[in-house]
Image: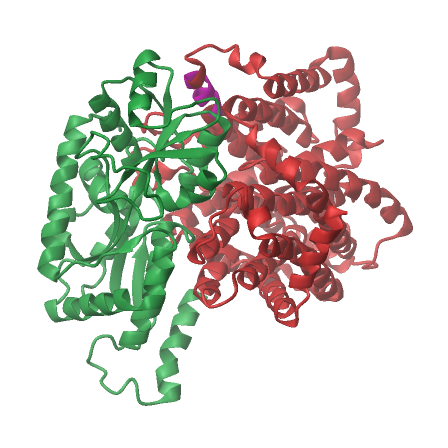
Chain colours: A red, B green
């Protein structure tokens, strides 16, 4: 068996004492910076980059990958505990994860996130070993028209994210789209809605928007609420482990999330970002009682957490074969590779099998280490919630400000975060869900860009979207999804299931 | 964290004693290098590699601060406004420090030519005129010209965005060939451009030769000319664009170090010498050679200044030849 030989080679490389050590260092550092929102993984990896110049390429990559996973896991921890998404992928974890924490199930939420991620990591490693050559081809058949159609599916799915009124959800998606339009027009270089502010020519950053609307909005809402309610939340911490019932609900969600994440992660660029959102939408769609979502449904944590980890794993395929990074940390890894004269390309797998498979194997080892590091820590994290809120919120504000600043070393973005915090509070008062807004914000600009690119490619003929089979398939899926949301008969049922109370 | 790190690093010499003897001698504390890109890109890596070696010769850490945004303007302004004492430097490239000051002059809150001084050029990057092999079959510049002439508006080129140097290069190239090609800009840079070519969204581009090496080997891309002073020894069969009949077309991409204009001359000399020394280290040369980049520091401070002035003039000419409408 070819794939056994490949995995054997990979584990041979990853299990040397030195590489195990680098994986451990990476995971420890990553967990630390992930949980302390003030220090981002990008800044950390950038500082450690010169160190990797002196290492074997594979050792350097193993360490950086450990930081990446550790940080991602740490990001989920803050999302669950204090409603603070550090990265795109943990936005959806906030929705139900933080609600679970409010219900006193923070321990269970953290446990299921760790177990789900581990399971997804294991399966995704096997998938890569079995199918990586054909999976690499999938990414290479996605041009502008295909991306446009994929984004259309994503945007329609965004509406399903909300658990309140459908009108509000659509409005939030549109608002997100509009915010996403700010900046330099990619096709003409013109400035849109920048009001002469130089910094805005790069658009509004994701981190200020997400931290402001989710994290700070929540802080304001908590401070406005009567004190008893706040303290009640923090004192009701029950069992850290999953109950039998929770486990029964969580594991199928984890399996579904893993599958959807593995597939989407292969798409260069937007794929890994979409996977957590897609995982959440799927869970809500298949759930017998969707009204539980948004109020602390454990599937809403297990599904997206698994999807996001699986997606992160398989997105190494476009990174290593096309050189397209899924996020800023991966961009740094490519930088580390080029220092050693290794250019990402289709032949990395065949020409540098030890590097490629060693890396894949070390991902799995990294996942094991994270599980071992994090499970005993959960009790400790949960204790954080016992800190009186009047002290905790100050720490949240401080770390948010530092965290936002370090992304671009820019004070303007800190001010922007504060403004979005107020906006976030207004949304809470109006009972508008912020998740669809963020999805609109991420997908809208990608969709516009690819629409205009596709039209340029076809010379203005819209048939290009129907003539290409993958694009056509995706558009049909989008139409079906729209039908499900819009058909009056089904809508009646939808309101019944989706409406609160 | 970074600040903490600085404090910690600057305390090192005290701990190990001796080195910090002459407090007034430059540098007596860590030096900041502003890079106008996010970590991980070519300019960032150059700054980090040089920083490592300059630390060895000057005994102080050179800490990279990434200040991306607004075509490099944010980073340039931060450097230009810093105290001109040699503790704030800047490493930029042809896009941020030659095209941006011309194209976006109005967006600056400083006077670029008055407030910024070129310390030394550092490296030169060759680029390929490269075509895809996905549904497109041209083997040299002449065939490209024929194809594009036969199918006006059907041959597409990708670039790193409107107003990027690959955009200008392709636009000038297309005009000299007498063809009409469609521009499909891609904001995501080299990786995105490669993807555009491989999936067939575009057929041709000006692309950094190192970025394309793996795809060339895989037969997905084909270099038909190189923009460089001479042929690359790794690609002896690929003619320079001048040899292919188009002299004075295409940009020699560079990276260069800058400082606030009022920085004292002796301090600039010290920095200049440190870059020169670093450029001679075999390990550094090897790291760049692997990416087909030649390390080419200026001969002197004066040389750096006149060279950069010349670059600005070239781009003034190019941007007036190729009018790009960048509405505010």
**In the image, residue B257 above or below residue B325:** below
Residue nearest the observer in this picture, A8 or A57:
A8
Which residue: 33% across, 65% down? B51
Magenta residues?
A450-456
Residue nearest the observer in this picture, A269 or A193:
A269
Which residue: 59% across, 35% down? A267
Instruction: Give the main secondary structure, helix, strand or loop, of the magenta stretch.
Output: helix
Residue nearest the observer in this picture, B274 or B149:
B149
Q: Quadrant of residue A300?
A: top right
Q: Quadrant of residue A493?
A: top right
Task: Tell whether A165 sits left or right of A180.
Answer: right
Q: Is residue A453 magenta?
A: yes
Instruction: List the single residue furthest toward the front.
Output: B237
Residue nearest the observer in this picture, B198 or B1:
B198
Q: Position of residue A349 (x, y in %)?
A: 59, 47
Q: Is residue B261 magenta?
A: no
Q: Position of residue B171 (x, y in %)?
A: 26, 26
**In the image, residue A346 above or below residue B178:** below
Residue B59 seen by the camera: yes
Q: Position of residue B48 (x, y in %)?
A: 36, 61
**In the image, residue A244 above or below residue A489:** below
Residue A297 seen by the camera: no
Can you say which quadrant of the picture contains the C terminus of chain A? top right
């Amino acid at each position: 068996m070819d794939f056994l030989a490949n995995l054997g080679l990979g584990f041979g490389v990853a299990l040397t004492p030195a590489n195990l050590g680098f994986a451990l260092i990476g995971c420890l550092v990553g967990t630390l910076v992930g949980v302390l929102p003030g220090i981002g993984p990008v800044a950390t990896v950038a500082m450690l980059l010169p160190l990797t110049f002196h290492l074997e390429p594979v050792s350097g990559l193993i360490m950086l990958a450990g930081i990446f996973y550790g940080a991602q896991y740490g990001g989920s921890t803050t999302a669950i505990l204090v409603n603070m998404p550090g990265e795109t992928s943990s936005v959806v974890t906030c929705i139900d994860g933080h609600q679970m924490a409010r219900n006193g199930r923070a321990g269970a939420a953290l446990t299921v996130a760790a177990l789900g991620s581990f399971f997804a990591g294991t399966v995704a490693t096997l998938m890569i070993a079995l199918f990586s050559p054909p999976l690499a081809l999938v990414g290479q058949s996605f041009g502008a028209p295909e991306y446009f159609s994929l984004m259309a599916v994503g945007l329609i799915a965004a509406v399903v994210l909300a658990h309140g009124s459908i009108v509000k959800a659509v409005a939030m998606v549109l608002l997100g789209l509009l915010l996403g339009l700010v900046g330099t027009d990619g096709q003409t270089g013109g400035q849109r809605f920048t009001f002469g502010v130089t910094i805005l020519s790069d658009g509004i950053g994701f981190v200020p928007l997400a931290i402001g609307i989710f994290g700070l909005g929540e802080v304001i809402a908590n401070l406005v609420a009567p004190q008893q309610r706040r303290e009640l939340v923090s004192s009701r911490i029950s069992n850290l482990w999953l109950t039998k019932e929770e486990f029964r609900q969580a594991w199928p969600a984890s399996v579904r999330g893993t599958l959807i994440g593995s597939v989407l992660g292969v798409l260069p660029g937007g794929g890994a970002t979409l996977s957590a959102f897609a995982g959440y939408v799927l869970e809500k769609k298949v759930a017998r009682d969707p009204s539980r979502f948004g109020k602390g449904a454990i599937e809403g944590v297990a599904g997206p957490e698994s999807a996001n980890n699986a997606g992160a794993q398989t997105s190494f395929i476009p990174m290593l074969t096309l050189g397209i990074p899924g996020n800023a940390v991966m961009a740094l890894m490519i930088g580390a590779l080029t220092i050693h004269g290794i250019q990402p390309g289709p032949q990395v797998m065949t020409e540098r099998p030890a590097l490629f498979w060693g890396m894949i194997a070390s991902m799995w080892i990294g996942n094991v280490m994270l599980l071992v590091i994090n499970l005993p820590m959960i009790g400790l994290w949960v204790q954080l919630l016992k800190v009186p809120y009047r002290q905790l919120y100050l720490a949240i504000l401080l770390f948010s400000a530092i965290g936002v600043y370090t992304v671009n070393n820019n004070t303007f973005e800190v001010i922007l975060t504060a403004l979005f915090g107020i906006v976030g509070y207004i949304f809470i008062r109006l009972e508008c869900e912020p998740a669809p807004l963020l999805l609109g914000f991420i997908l809208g600009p990608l969709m516009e860009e690819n629409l205009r690119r596709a039209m340029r490619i076809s010379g203005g003929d819209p048939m290009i979207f129907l003539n290409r089979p993958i694009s056509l398939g995706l558009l049909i899926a989008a139409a079906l999804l729209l039908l499900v949301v819009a058909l009056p008969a089904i809508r009646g049922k939808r309101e019944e299931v989706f409406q609160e109370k | 964290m970074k600040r903490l790190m600085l404090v910690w690093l600057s305390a090192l010499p005290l701990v190990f004693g001796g080195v910090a003897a002459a407090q007034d001698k430059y540098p007596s504390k860590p030096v900041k290098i502003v890079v106008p890109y996010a970590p991980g890109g070519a300019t960032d890596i150059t700054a980090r590699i040089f920083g490592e070696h300059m630390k060895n010769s000057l005994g102080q850490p050179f800490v990279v601060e990434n200040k991306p945004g607004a075509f490099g303007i944010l980073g340039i302004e931060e450097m230009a406004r810093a105290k001109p004492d040699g503790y704030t430097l800047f490493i930029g490239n042809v896009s941020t420090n030659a095209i941006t000051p011309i194209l976006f002059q109005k967006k600056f809150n400083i006077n670029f030519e008055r407030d910024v001084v070129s310390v030394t050029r550092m490296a030169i990057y060759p680029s390929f005129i490269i075509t895809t092999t996905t549904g497109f079959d041209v083997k040299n510049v002449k065939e490209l010209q024929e194809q594009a002439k036969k199918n006006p508006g059907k041959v597409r080129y990708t670039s790193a965005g409107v107003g990027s140097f690959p955009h200008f290069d392709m636009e000038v190239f297309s005009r000299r060939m007498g063809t009409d090609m469609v521009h499909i800009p891609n904001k995501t840079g080299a990786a995105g451009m490669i993807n555009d070519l491989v999936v067939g969204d575009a057929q041709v581009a000006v692309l950094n030769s190192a970025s394309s090496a793996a795809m060339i080997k895989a037969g997905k891309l084909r270099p038909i000319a190189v923009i460089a002073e001479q042929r690359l020894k790794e690609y002896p069969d690929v003619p320079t664009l001048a040899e292919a009949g188009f002299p004075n077309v295409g940009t020699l991409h560079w990276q260069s170090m800058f400082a606030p204009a009022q920085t004292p001359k002796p301090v600039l000399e010290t920095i200049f010498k440190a870059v020169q020394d670093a450029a001679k280290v075999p390990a550094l040369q090897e790291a760049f050679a692997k990416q087909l980049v030649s390390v080419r520091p200026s001969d002197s401070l004066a040389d750096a200044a006149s060279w950069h002035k010349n670059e600005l003039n070239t781009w003034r000419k190019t941007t007036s030849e190729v009018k790009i409408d960048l509405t505010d």
